[in-house]
Amino acid sequence: MNSDPAAAHLELRQAVREFATAVIKPLAPRTDHEHRYPREALDAAAELDLMGILVPPEYGGAGLDHLAFAICIEEIATACASTAVLVDVHNSVASEPILLFGNEEQKRAWLPRLALGEFLGAFALTEPASGSDAASLKTSAKRYGEEFVLTTNAQLPGAAGVSCFIVPGDAPGLKVGQVFEKMGLNGSPTGELVLEEVRVPAANLLHEEGKGFTVAMRALDSGRIGISAQALGIGQAALNEALAYTRDREQFDQPIASFQGVSWMLAEMATRLEASRRLVYHAADLCSRGLPFTKEASMAKVFTTDNAMAITTDAIQLAGGYGYIEDYPFERFFRDAKACQIYEGSNQVQRIVIARELLR
Ligand SMILES: Cc1cc2nc3c(=O)[nH]c(=O)nc-3n(C[C@H](O)[C@H](O)[C@H](O)COP(=O)(O)OP(=O)(O)OC[C@H]3O[C@@H](n4cnc5c(N)ncnc54)[C@H](O)[C@@H]3O)c2cc1C
């Protein structure tokens, strides 16, 4: 196995790192503290083709592979986790299903606009009573001739009856309900979508009627590579800041990094991160090569996100009291990392996926 990034991937990493450090990182504290949508960062990302990473050039995107995608998300998350999840979801679970399951007309209609960043893609699967058990969703779709009418909170279709639709944000009847106050990722709004008899043309049905669960599960498989890369970036940011802080901070007349108890914690953080990186790149490489990668993506997600929590917790500890206050970025890393263990399938659900793949 060789999933080491090739020269082109390393060049890409360097370019995205320079961009993220110069443009995205300076906005990160304000994005978090003011719960501010990072519009400038997203506009700048679109200029660099980062809103169409996986979209082939014939549809206006960069046409890169999943390893390149993971590297881009990792570098953006090292600068700002909120911006990273917006870019990640847009590229993966919002755009990729159209690439994988869309017909030619749908690809031509939506992918160039998504790749340009003309609008931001979202993915709506969870309902108030349907989370890990995603097949228990209640939103209904009824066909009337050449239209479907979508309504939340109707009957129970069951997994076989789930269909997937491309719904424009300005579709009549589509409303944003409560926008939640969260513990982290404050620049990335999370809220309810209310569908009151939303009419969408039958041409917006993605894949076949009743095959929407297949679309969602495949989208989440590669989506998990993106979430793992996001956690990797958050962990890297925590390690970078912890290294700088412990070199600079002096107690007992010496930098605290010179104490073995501190340096061993840094060594442990770096080791967790490197092992995580190997798993993420391996899953991404399998996906890029068209090989089965469901188990590996779930392993990457569990390992990387659990380790991001451990690394960000240790980073707070290494900064002592300053780690706990908002003037320093450590507590933000910790709050942002937590979501990665929950969304796109909780880490318990990932363990179910891994075990199922092992035992089948
Ligand atoms: C910041 C954020 C952004 C989000 N964005 C989106 C989005 O854009 N689109 C979207 O559709 N959803 C989104 N979600 C929802 C997210 O995907 C769900 O929260 C997640 O799938 C878990 O579902 P739940 O919250 O209903 O928890 P539940 O399914 O109720 O689970 C609660 C707990 O029980 C555990 N559990 C459940 N079933 C099992 C089992 N069989 N075995 C063992 N443990 C189990 C879970 O792991 C969890 O610990 C977002 C969530 C967050 C936090």
Image (cartoon, grey):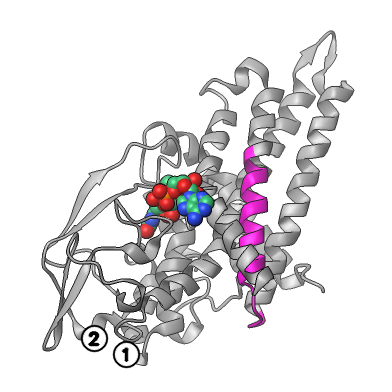
Q: Residues within 10 Å of mark 2 (few under 14, many from 20)?
A: some
Tell me the number on the disc at residue 105. 1
Instruction: Name which residue lies at 39% across and 74% down.
Output: 213
> Could you say whether the residue bearing mark 2 is in a helix, strand or loop?
helix
Whether residue 28 is in magenta: the answer is: no
Q: Position of residue 25 (x, y in %)?
A: 54, 43
Classify residue 166 by image quadrant. bottom left
Residue found at the far bottom of this picture:
104
Q: Quadrant of residue 74?
A: bottom right
Residue at 40% x, 79% y is 98
Between 116 and 157, which is closer to the camera in this rendering? Answer: 157
Q: Give the residue type at disc 1.
A: Glu
Q: Does residue 278 lie above or below 180 as drawn?
A: below
Residue 54 visible within the image: yes
Give the percent coordinates (x, y) of residue 168. 23, 69
**Residue 93: x percent and y percent?**
44, 67
- The span picked out in magenta is 289-309
| Tag 2: amino acid | Ala
Q: Which mark is residue 203?
A: 2
Query: Split into 4 quadrants, where in the image is the N terminus?
Result: bottom right
